[in-house]
Image (cartoon, rainbow, N blue to C red):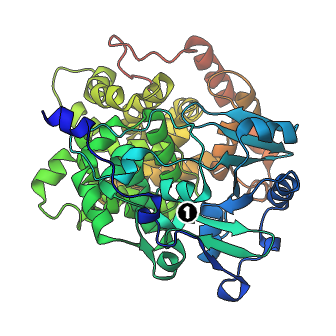
């Protein structure tokens, strides 16, 4: 009976009921500081060309939001009432992409401008949320009006249109005032919006921390209520969002916001389970946890222009689990780590190459405690591994977070000793992790030419050491992580 009642439930309301300004409130030049010369010139050309062919077109989303907040946008997106096929007929330098919602990429030298068509509003958005209905978007290629498109977006701050013809901003949902008041608010019913696209919950926390916004009360409550919906989200989209977070220099603060809203009970739940049980104020005191401390140090190093890869951040999150695995008896090094992390890798659908790299990073941590100069050839061989930089940064950050003086001194040894004995350039061109990216990644470890005035003498002194290294490389060309040989390279 409940199914039938939901099936024949009368739709209520209309798109106008969702919009704060159904006719579109325009803010002209005297109300804001955005001008056409602030917009990417190629995006402006696209809009003018679409206008020439009789179509509406505006700058939309993050570009408008960031300019109003006094930030520099990373890109500018265009929205229009022209369909993808119509756009393709106007522009030769474009391609249609996407399955869930088709958009057009217009290609310019060195960049891509994304052009989308106004989307329609699904009928279920006009009614009240039904408890057992699946709202997850699977396909979304119905086109609509500017009003429907505005009501269809995630947050009010991302639903503003900028008209380059007269420097005006068109606001249907109250986003202009929300930006002024530093408020992050979902458009429409958050109980539907977050079930329609669960990734919006993660994005809400991210935007709030990065942009200095306060999450509106109803929106915040809905995030806590529907956090479990994140398990339905596409793993590729989640990985994309994580990688964006890792580049913000505010990963620790964003994770604190995630903890406060209960999202870490679903995301990376294995890594935080013990900490949550031990600390009733887990969200508020997240930065005092082991993971919180490590992420805060990584953010600080980013501000100091150190390079931080996604592998480093994932390692900092899973580090405690790997350490616990290594404390188990009767287990070889690599199998212990692999058995501990495999369930997480499977749930997150982590690619195999990333799994292998993380295991290598964890398996090599104890190697950094060995600092004997008489093992210089082995040390140099270790430095040539393609994962060395990531592993070293994880070790260094862990040492600082735990205030472990011995480990800090070991980290100092590895950082300084590499400057004393730089890796020969030819090693980066051969096997064993000699890619250009690894060369660039280790550039901070290389000794400055000015610090080495007597280079010929140094080369003569190290000739026998180089020969020893070459012999060892010929004998040990592979990286074997089998149970029979449990990480003894490290």
Q: Where is residue 278 in the image (x, y as percent from the top left)?
A: 11, 55
Q: Residue at 40% of width from left, 42% of height from top?
A: 315
Which quadrant, please, contains the C terminus? top left
Q: Where is residue 401 in the image (x, y as percent from the top left)?
A: 34, 59
In the image: residue 287, left or right of residue 420:
left
Q: Is residue 62 or residue 126 the one in the foreground?
A: 126
Which quadrant, please, contains the N terminus? top left
Q: Is residue 316 above or below residue 76?
A: above
Whether residue 343 can be seen here: yes
User: Quadrant location of residue 442?
Assistant: top right
Q: Is residue 207 or residue 434 the one in the foreground?
A: 207
Q: Is residue 86 or residue 241 the one in the foreground?
A: 86
Q: In this view, does 320 lie above or below 464?
A: below
Q: Residue at 54% of width from left, 42% of height from top?
A: 389
Q: Position of residue 235 (x, y in %)?
A: 42, 34
In the image: residue 321, left or right of residue 138:
left
User: Quadrant location of residue 234?
Assistant: top left
Q: Mark 1 points at which residue?
A: 159
Circle 1: element type: loop
Q: Position of residue 115 (x, y in %)?
A: 71, 48
In the image: residue 212, left or right of residue 478:
left
Crowd class of label 1 (few under 14; some 14 to 19; many from 20; radius 10 Å): many
């Amino acid at each position: 009976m409940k199914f039938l009642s939901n099936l024949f439930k009368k739709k209520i309301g209309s798109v106008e009921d969702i919009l704060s300004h159904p006719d579109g409130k325009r803010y002209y030049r005297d109300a804001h500081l955005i001008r056409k010369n602030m917009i990417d010139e190629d995006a402006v050309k696209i809009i003018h060309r679409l206008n020439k062919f009789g179509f509406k077109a505006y700058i939309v989303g993050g570009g408008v939001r960031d300019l109003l907040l006094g930030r520099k946008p990373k890109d500018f997106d265009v929205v229009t009432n022209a369909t993808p096929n119509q756009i393709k007929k106007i522009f030769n330098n474009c391609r249609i992409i996407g399955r869930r919602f088709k958009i057009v990429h217009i290609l310019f030298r060195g960049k891509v401008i994304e052009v989308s068509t106004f989307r329609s509003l699904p009928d279920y958005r006009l009614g009240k949320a039904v408890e057992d209905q699946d709202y997850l978007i699977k396909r979304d290629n119905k086109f609509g009006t500017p009003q429907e498109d505005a009501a269809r977006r995630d947050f009010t701050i991302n639903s503003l249109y900028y008209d380059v013809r007269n420097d005006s901003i068109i606001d249907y949902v109250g986003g202009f005032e929300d930006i002024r008041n530093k408020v992050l608010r979902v458009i429409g019913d958050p109980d539907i919006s977050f079930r329609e696209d669960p990734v919006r919950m993660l994005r809400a926390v991210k935007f709030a921390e990065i942009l200095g916004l306060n999450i509106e009360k109803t929106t915040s409550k809905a995030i806590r209520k529907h956090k479990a919906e994140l398990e339905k989200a596409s793993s590729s989209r989640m990985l994309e969002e994580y990688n964006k977070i890792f580049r913000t220099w505010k990963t620790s603060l964003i994770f604190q916001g995630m903890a406060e809203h209960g999202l870490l009970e679903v995301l990376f739940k294995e890594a935080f389970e013990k900490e949550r049980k031990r600390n009733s104020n887990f969200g508020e005191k997240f930065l005092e946890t082991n993971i919180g401390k490590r992420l805060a140090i990584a953010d600080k190093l980013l501000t100091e222009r150190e390079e931080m890869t996604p592998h480093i951040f994932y390692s900092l999150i899973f580090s405690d689990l790997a350490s616990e695995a290594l404390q188990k008896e009767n287990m070889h090094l690599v199998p212990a780590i692999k058995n501990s992390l495999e369930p997480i890798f499977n749930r997150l659908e982590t690619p195999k190459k990333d799994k292998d790299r993380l295991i290598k990073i964890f398996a090599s941590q104890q190697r950094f405690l060995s600092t004997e100069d008489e093992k210089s050839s082995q040390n140099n061989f270790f430095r040539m591994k393609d994962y060395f930089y990531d592993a070293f940064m994880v070790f260094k950050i862990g040492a600082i977070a735990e205030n472990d003086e011995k480990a800090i001194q070991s980290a100092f040894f590895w950082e300084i000793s590499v400057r004393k004995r730089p890796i020969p350039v030819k090693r980066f061109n051969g096997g064993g992790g000699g890619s250009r990216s690894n060369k660039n990644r280790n550039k901070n470890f290389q000794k400055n030419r000015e610090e080495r005035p007597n280079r010929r003498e140094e080369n003569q002194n190290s000739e026998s050491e180089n020969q020893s290294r070459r012999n060892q490389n010929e004998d040990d060309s592979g990286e074997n992580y089998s149970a029979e040989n449990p990480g003894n390279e490290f």
